[in-house]
C-alpha cells in the first residue's frame, strides 16, 4: 500500500496547530483577562491555574512550526516572508509573557509591571495569531514559487477582524478554564464574564464566517454549491450543538461543560477552515504537494514524529491528570 506522505504530514501539522490553539488558547486567555480580576489574590490564583502546564502547551507551537520548516519548506519560506511582522511580534509577546510568569513571583515592587507584561504579551500574541490566520485565509501572493506581495499585505480589515476574534475567543476559553479550576470570588467573576464573552465570540465567528467565502471563489463554491454543501452542512450543525452546551452550562452553574464547549467552538471553526483550504497549503496557489519536501525527507521525519507525538501526548495528559481538580488558592505552585 502506497501512503501519500505529503497528505499525512499535512494532517500532522494541522493536528499540532489545532492542539496548540485549544491548549495554549486558554492560558493566553487567562492573561487577557488579568486586568478584570479584582484583587491581587485573584490574579495570583488565575496565574497559578495555568502555571504547571503553560510551557508544555507551547510545545505544540514548536512542533507545528518546526514540522512546517522540515517537511513543507516552500510553505514555510513563503508564509514567513509574507507574515514576518505578525509572527515576530507574536514570538516577542510570548517571550515577555513567559518572563512575566517567572519574575512576577520574585518581586513586589515591580509586580504591576510584570502584570502588564503578562496581560500585554498574552493579548498581543493572540492578536498576532488571529491576524496571521486572516492574512493566510485572504491569500498570499506567490510568483515563481516566491512571495511577491508587499510588506503590509497582511494588514487588512479582514485580518484585523480575525485578530480581534481570536483575542475574544481566547478570553472565553480563559474564563471557562478559570471557572472549571477555581472557587470563590474569582470563579464568580469569570462566570459573570463568560456569557458576554460567549456572545461576542459567536458574533465574531459569524462575521468571519460570512466574510471568508468572499476572500476566494473556491471558498464560496465549497460552502454554497453542490456537492460541497453535503460536506460542509454538518459544520454549522455541530456548531449549534456546541453553542447550546456552552450557554446551558453557564446558565446552570456547570464547571466543566462550558470549557469543553468553548474548546469545541475552536475545533469546529478549525475544521471549517480546513474544509475551505483543502488541498491548498498556501492559498490561493500552492497545494500540499506543491510545497512538500522530497519523499525521502518526509519518510525520515515521519519516523521520529511517530515516536515523538505519542510521548508529547503522554506527558501532556499526565500533567493535566496530576494537576486535575480545583486549585487551592492558599497552596499554589509558586
Image (cartoon, rainbow, N blue to C red):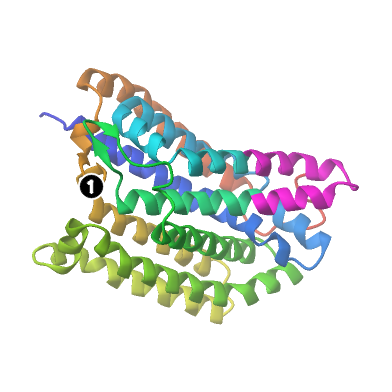
Which element is circle 1 on? loop
Give the residue displayed 58% in from the left and 42% down from the top.
319
Few, some or many C-alpha atoms within 10 Å of disc 1 (few <14, some 14-19, many ≥20)?
A: some
* Residue at 52 percent of width and 41 percent of height: 316
- Determine the image quadrant of residue 192: bottom right
Rendered residue at 26%/38% (across/down) = 142
Residue at point 44%, 52% (across, down): 155
Where residue 322 sits, quadrant-wise, is top right
Considering every residue shown, the one lying at the far bottom of the view is 251
- Left/right of residue 107 with respect to residue 27 in the rendered view: right
**The magenta stretch spans which residues?**
95-120
Residue 201 falls within the magenta-colored stretch:
no
Residue 32 position in % (x across, y down) = 63, 58
Q: Is residue 7 above or below residue 295?
A: below
| Magenta stretch, overall SS | helix
Depicted 279 relative to depicted 76: above or below: below
Quadrant of the frame with the C terminus: top right
Can residue 97 be found in the magenta stretch? yes
Residue extending farthest to the front is 150
Where residue 39 sits: x, y (%)? 82, 65
Q: Can residue 129 be seen in this snapshot?
A: yes
| Location of residue 309 in the rendering, given as x and y in whole percent from the top left corner | 41, 33
Most extreme residue toward the right is 109
Q: Out of 54 and 97, give the one closest to the viewer.
A: 97
Residue that label 1 marks? 284
Q: Is residue 233 above or below residue 47?
A: below
Q: Quadrant of the N terminus?
A: top left
Residue 328 shows up from this direction: no
**Horizontal relation, residue 144 to residue 39: left or right:** left
Tell me where residue 150 sits by quadrant: top left
Amino acid at each position: 500500500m502506497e501512503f501519500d506522505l505529503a497528505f499525512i504530514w499535512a494532517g500532522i501539522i494541522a493536528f499540532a496547530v489545532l492542539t496548540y490553539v485549544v491548549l495554549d488558547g486558554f492560558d493566553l486567555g487567562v492573561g487577557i483577562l488579568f486586568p478584570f480580576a479584582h484583587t491581587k489574590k485573584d490574579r495570583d490564583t488565575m496565574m497559578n491555574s495555568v502555571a504547571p502546564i503553560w510551557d508544555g502547551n507551547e510545545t505544540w507551537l514548536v512542533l507545528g512550526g518546526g514540522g512546517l520548516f522540515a517537511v513543507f519548506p516552500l510553505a514555510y519560506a513563503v508564509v514567513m516572508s509574507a507574515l514576518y511582522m505578525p509572527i515576530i511580534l507574536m514570538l516577542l509577546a510570548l517571550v515577555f509573557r513567559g518572563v512575566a510568569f517567572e519574575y512576577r513571583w520574585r518581586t513586589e515592587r515591580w509586580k504591576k509591571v510584570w502584570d502588564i507584561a503578562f496581560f500585554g504579551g498574552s493579548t498581543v500574541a493572540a492578536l498576532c495569531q488571529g491576524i496571521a490566520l486572516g492574512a493566510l485565509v485572504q491569500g498570499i501572493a506567490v510568483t515563481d514559487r516566491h512571495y511577491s506581495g508587499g510588506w503590509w499585505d497582511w494588514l487588512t480589515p479582514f485580518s484585523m477582524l480575525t485578530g480581534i476574534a481570536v483575542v475574544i475567543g481566547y478570553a472565553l476559553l480563559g474564563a471557562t478554564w478559570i471557572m472549571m479550576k477555581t472557587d470563590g470570588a474569582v470563579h464568580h467573576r469569570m462566570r459573570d464574564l463568560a456569557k458576554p464573552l460567549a456572545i461576542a465570540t459567536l458574533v465574531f465567528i459569524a462575521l468571519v464566517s460570512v466574510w471568508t467565502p468572499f476572500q476566494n471563489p473556491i471558498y464560496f463554491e465549497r460552502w454554497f454549491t453542490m456537492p460541497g454543501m453535503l460536506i460542509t452542512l454538518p459544520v454549522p450543525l455541530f456548531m449549534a450543538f456546541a453553542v447550546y452546551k456552552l450557554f446551558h452550562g453557564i446558565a446552570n452553574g456547570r464547571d466543566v461543560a462550558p470549557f469543553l464547549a468553548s474548546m469545541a467552538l475552536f475545533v469546529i471553526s478549525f475544521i471549517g477552515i480546513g474544509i475551505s483550504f483543502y488541498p491548498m497549503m498556501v492559498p490561493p496557489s500552492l497545494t500540499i504537494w506543491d510545497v512538500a519536501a522530497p519523499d525521502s525527507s518526509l519518510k525520515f521525519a515521519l519516523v521520529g514524529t511517530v515516536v515523538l507525538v505519542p510521548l508529547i501526548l503522554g506527558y501532556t495528559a499526565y500533567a493535566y491528570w496530576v494537576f486535575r481538580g480545583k486549585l487551592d488558592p492558599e497552596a499554589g505552585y509558586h
